[in-house]
Image (cartoon, grey):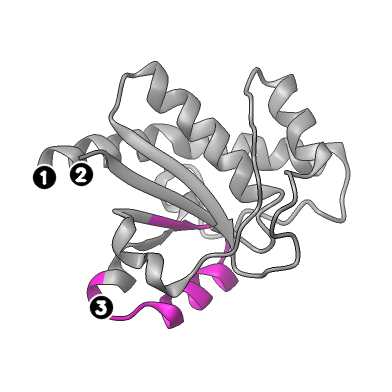
Amino acid sequence: MPYRVTFVCTGNICRSPMAEAILRHHAEEEGLDVEVDSSGTGNWHVGDGADERTIAALHRAGYRSAHIARQFEESWFDRYDLILALDQGHLRALRSMAPDDEARARVRLLREFDPEAGADLDVPDPYYGGRADFDLVLEQVEAAVPGLLEEIRAGSKAA
């Protein structure tokens, strides 16, 4: 069975679809058996594609994405080995939804996997910003990828 990872942000049109596309790309390059997807804590954008600025940042960096936004549902906790929140607000929301301690333990912050992240583990929301804000999100996600791939490899062996 593949290792299953999901990213969660607010509306599932900026940060989490970007993280999804980047991790999927690197996992495929390494031949890892992993399923990657994303969702949001809110329902404002359900059914919408990713923000055009997210798509542009991904394309500039050589990634591709065909994304449709959806909202995370409490019943999904059992589907995933790792649930990655993009900021502290998402972390709190997801952990409060979790049905038990085991599910809560699978919810982590993306930037926990970046050894250079420092104390601020939030990926800032670029929605009200410009190109530089989306590029920063891309850089922060890419910085966490090596640590995430290590976690996936370790988790795949333990399963």
**Would you say the residues marked 3 and 1 are in contact, meaning their CB atoms lie under 8 Å apart?**
no
Mark 2 surroundings within 10 Å by alpha-carbon count, few (fewer than 14), some (14 through 19), many (20 or more) = some
Q: Which residue is mark 2?
A: 155
Question: What type is the residue that disc 2 sits on?
Answer: Gly
Q: What is the C-alpha distance between the residues marked 3 and 1?
A: 19 Å
Q: Which residues are magenta?
A: 83-102
The one of 119 and 151 positioned closer to us in this rendering = 151
Which residue is painted at 71% across and 50% down in the image?
13
Name the outermost residue toward the left.
Answer: 158
The vertical placement of 30 against 40, above or below, is above
Asked if the magenta segment contains residue 143, the reply would be: no
Q: Residue at x 71, y 40 (%)?
A: 136
Residue 73 visible in the displayed image: yes
What kind of residue is marked 3?
Asp
Q: Position of residue 90 (x, y in %)?
A: 56, 69
Where does label 3 land, which residue? 101
Question: Residue at (45%, 51%) from the top-left corner?
Answer: 6
Mark identifier at residue 49 = none
- From the viewer's perspective, is residue 115 above or below residue 31? below
Label pair 1/2, CB-CB below 8 angstroms: yes
State which tag comes first along the sequence, 3 or 1.
3
Judge whether 153 appears above or below 30 on screen.
below
**Relative to the observer, which residue lies in front, 76 or 32?**
76
Quarter of the figure that contains the N terminus: top left
Q: In the image, what residue type sits under mark 1?
A: Ala
Instruction: Say whether residue 84 is left or right of residue 59.
Output: left
First of labels 3, 2 by sequence position: 3
Which mark identifies residue 158? 1
Binning the other alpha carbons within 10 Å of mark 3 as few (below 14), some (14 to 19) or many (20 upward) gives few
Image quarter for residue 42? bottom right
Image coordinates of residue 60 in percent, x first then y, are 74, 20
Between 47 and 145, the one nearer to me in the picture: 47
